[in-house]
Amino acid sequence: MDTTSITSEARDTYDQTPVVLSTTIVRQHRTSAVGPLPPSNMRPDQLLRLSQLPQAAAHGAKALFSTETARSMTESHVRDIWFSADAVCFDVDSTVCTDEAIDELAAFIGVGDEVARCTHSAMNGNVSFREALKMRLDIMKPSFEQLETYALTHTPRLTQGIRELVDTLHKRNVDVYLVSGGFRRLIKPVADLLKIDHDRIFANEILFDEYGNYDGFDDTEPTSASGSKSVGKAGVCGLLKRKMGYKTLVMVGDGATDAEACPPADAFIGFGGNQARENVRRLAGWYVYDFKTLTDSLNKNQ
């Protein structure tokens, strides 16, 4: 099912007409008797987010999925789910890509070491993701010009084997999503390299004022938070299951926020090819160190 089909399901209760300065979105609200109305030019991921995110994800966690957690699944069980998946959500930083884009952007700006420490804490679950995101952005305060310059001069560093894996999934008619706590502007080039539609990106937006100065981040994005099944990657997975009708959805990633997505994801596959995190390995029913393992498992069972 194409994500644009969500449009017909959206309630006539939201009108956020985005004023876009590249990655900048400043929202203007207009109310009506029944509330705001969604504009026709909203991205499908925005429509998903607006479709009562907490309620939808909570419903998914309670009603659509078994009580079995990622921790209790055997590798054999996860392999079976992987082979039958009709949707796969990939984390981006240190999973699809070899590096952490926010750290690379921070280094480009000149505050790399301080921001890297915040990233390490976030990925190991020592602070909430939103707190870590705010801390890092408050240190960086990237301008519009800095973000654009970085995006245009730095080619994404794809992890070995990810192109082949995504190609294999696409040939199997599996929908592939990029679900990241990073920034949409930096993930679009990754999606282009992997031939993934931009409307299958769930990520964060950096906001700028009219002069292009840093002005915070969009905290209504589900990926700007973590810690419950109604937000973060768990919230996205729950909504995709509910709104797109996926029967078997798998989350693949290297961090604590990725493991948190299962449930409502039907399985979590931990990835240690770039950063091996012991706490994440313990949560994963199946933990791999390269994407070839996942590709071979699909080809072997054909």
Image (spheres, grey):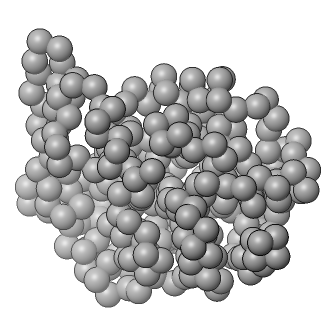
Q: Quadrant of residue 30?
A: top left
Tell me: 137 left or right of 38.
Answer: right
Which residue is nearer to you in this view: 271 or 256?
271
Q: Residue at x 61, y 82 (%)?
A: 164
**Which residue is situated farthest in the front direction here?**
302
Which residue is nearer to you in this view: 66 or 158?
66
Percent position of residue 236, x then y:
51, 43
User: Where's the C terminus, which quadrant?
Assistant: bottom right
Residue 123 visible: no
Q: Residue at x 24, y 74 (%)?
A: 148
Tell me: 229 left or right of 194.
Answer: right
Which residue is nearer to you in this view: 140 or 105?
105
Against 295, is 278 above or below? above
Which residue is nearer to you in this view: 149 or 264?
264
Against 295, is 137 above or below? above
Percent position of residue 253, x then y:
66, 61
Q: Quadrant of residue 99?
A: bottom right
Q: Residue at x 51, y 49 (%)?
A: 132
Residue 3 visible: yes
Percent position of residue 295, x then y:
72, 76
**Which residue is situated farthest in the top direction here?**
33
Number of disc labels = 0
Against 212, is 112 above or below? below
Tell me: 193 left or right of 288.
Answer: left
